[in-house]
Amino acid sequence: MHLPISDKIELNILHQNSHQAEKNKIKFNNYNLLCLNIMSSPGAGKTRLLEITLEDLSKKFYSAVLEGDMTTNLDAARLEKLNIPVVPITTGRACHLDANMVSGGLKLLEKKINPNLLDILLVENVGNLVCPAEFEIGEHFKVALLSITEGEDKPLKYPIMFREADLILITKVDLLPHLNFDINELKLNIASTNPKADVIEISSITKSGFHLWQDWISKKILKFKNN
Amino acid sequence: MTKCLILSMEEWAEKKNKKKIVVEKINLKIGEFTCVEPISLINTFNAAVLGSWLDSSEITIETIPFEGKCSKCNRLYFPKKENGYKSPCCNFNLEEIISGRELKIASIDFKEK
């Protein structure tokens, strides 16, 4: 046996994922297809958000969904009722989507529709406030949902998720009159973690704030298409 | 994360001729502002590599402090959750992160058989 050798490589542990994410992004760009990575804890309202959003959005833009789920296709089945292309990605025991999974989902999507015809791809990540924040999938923007039933402190407790997000949607705001919840404290906690993030309050029951969210998406699509 | 680490090691070993080396230490640099809990990474790695070519390797972790820069006075500071990550000097929100996001294999100590 020889003497030990130290190989100083300074290599990012996630470099393989980052490399695949970059390849995904190049594909999205070549298709002129804007990709949003939608993330939140379980039950914050991602699927319901997409159901309501796509009802209107699909009248103006050609949309598709990659639906990440650990064990079922239940959410994908809900979205398929909207008559848009939906590809379920079942992650098994993995608690997040990674770039390889999204690449596989994109290949399945290519069999359903020519992505050149699409304007926007919404990727619903697995419900989890931790791991999805670290794994790039090739998205152009990250959207994080936070429902008010989760508490004002979540941006401080899960700072990486809220730091990484380009837009934070505060969901279930119709419940505000029924809860002892300080939305201003939540907004301060978001601002202290990520002062640059856009923040929109929405309710899937009253539909309040949905016009702002739809405007946000529309502007991003149009800007992306014009670049 | 453990899977990504093992895949990175496999990729590195492919260039070294895996059968002719023994990895003694994998030296990581993990930032405090990441989703990685060092002890959990060590435990899951040790479990995942049992019986594999990495079975005898040990992980060491250098923790990189979470450091921000106050956007008002440019002072460096260590953001704290209890203070909402704000700068203690000017009470400004966390804008620039200087360090703490590292997830790196810094070096690999190995022997040739």
Image (cartoon, helix red, strand yellow):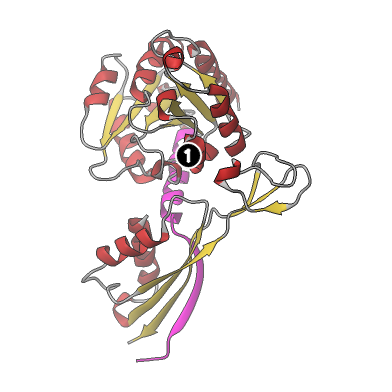
Q: Is residue B45 above or below residue A160?
A: below
Nearer-the-camera pick, B96 or A32: B96
Element under disc 1: helix
| Residue found 54% across the figure and 53% down from its top | B101
Q: What are the residue bounds of the magenta stretch?
A: A1-29
Nearer-the-camera pick, A55 or A202: A202
Instruction: Decide if residue B23 is on the left or right side of residue A23.
Output: left
Q: Is residue A32 above or below residue B36?
A: above
Q: Quadrant of the N terminus of chain A?
A: bottom left
| Residue found 44% across the figure and 24% down from its top | A148
Which residue is most to the right? B73
Q: Is residue A80 above or below residue A96?
A: above
Instruction: Decide if residue B84 is on the left or right side of residue A17.
Output: right
Instruction: Decide if residue A147 is on the left or right side of residue B93.
Output: left
Q: Quadrant of the C terminus of chain A?
A: top right
Subunit under mark 1:
A
Residue for badge 1:
A161
Magenta stretch: includes residue B40:
no
Q: Is residue A125 above or below residue A209?
A: below
